[in-house]
Image: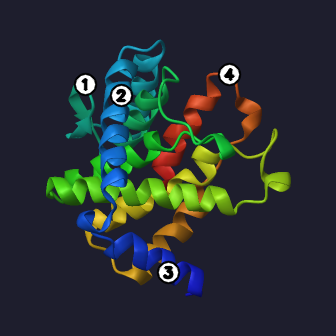
Amino acid sequence: MTEIEAGLADFSLHTRWPDLPTDVRQRTIDLMLDAIACAYTGRSADGRDRFADAVLSLTGPGSSLVVADPRGSSLLGAGMLNAWQVTATTMCDVYRPAMCHVTPIVLAGVLAGADLEPTSLDEFLAAFAIGVEVVLRLCSAMDDVQYRGPRWHAPGVIGPFGSAAAFGRLLGLDAGTLRAAWGAALLHSSGTFSAIVTPGVKLTQARGAAAAL
């Protein structure tokens, strides 16, 4: 494990909610509430039920939480649907330096983790904050010339790392296993900015959540 990977894994797994500055904790709560509100709005977005039918066909039924949908879904399907709903109406957050919608994919990972391992509110919020921060740090490290423009779409390429960090933290992974999870997420990561202004750009968020899980 490189020094960078080791540091990021240690940060992801061992940072506690009280360790975060007060303003960061408040911002985390604001982003969480905003993402959940966007997911509720996305439940009635155009094309949502068609997408849900496709996800059901691909991943099967289940009881994992899908925001505003009493039917639930498989764990993988719920992750895809939750991410899609948060970004469906394009009202969610955006990290403008990388043009990355961060919370759709991270929220999907946190909800999936809490489904498997019920947790405290502090740990739930900490996992969300950590997932968001991992995405932002990796976005900041990217080479703009190679990365931006019509090339890679950050939610599907970088988002899975933050979502996997949040998901893995809630499952109690150790650093080596989290590193392996990041490797798997990288293999599944995908998304091009060329899809912008088409319905395909929403699929990037759902695929990013699937890559993380």
Q: Is residue 67 left or right of residue 150?
A: left
What separation in Å lies between label 3 and label 1 (alpha carbons)?
37 Å
Give the labeled residue for mark 4.
198
Q: Is residue 94 left or right of residue 65?
A: right
Residue found 73% across the figure and 46% down from its top: 152
Looking at the image, which is closer to me, 108 or 149?
A: 149
Say whether marks 1 and 2 touch (CB < 8 Å).
yes
**Disc 1 residue crowd, few under 14, some 14–19, many 20+, Cα 10 Å:** some
Q: Position of residue 67 (x, y in %)?
A: 27, 31
Q: Amino acid at mark 4?
A: Thr
Q: Position of residue 29 (x, y in %)?
A: 29, 43
Q: Earlier in the sequence, mark 2 or mark 3?
A: 3
| Disc 3 versus disc 4: nearer the observer | 3
Give the labeled residue for mark 2.
39
Q: Earlier in the sequence, mark 3 or mark 1?
A: 3
**Disc 2 residue crowd, few under 14, some 14–19, many 20+, Cα 10 Å:** many
Residue found 48% across the figure and 29% down from its top: 87
What separation in Å lies between label 1 and label 4 (alpha carbons)?
25 Å
Task: From this view, report whether residue 10 is shown above or below residue 188.
Answer: below
Give the labeled residue for mark 1.
68
State the image quarter where residue 173 is shown.
bottom left
Give the labeled residue for mark 3.
7
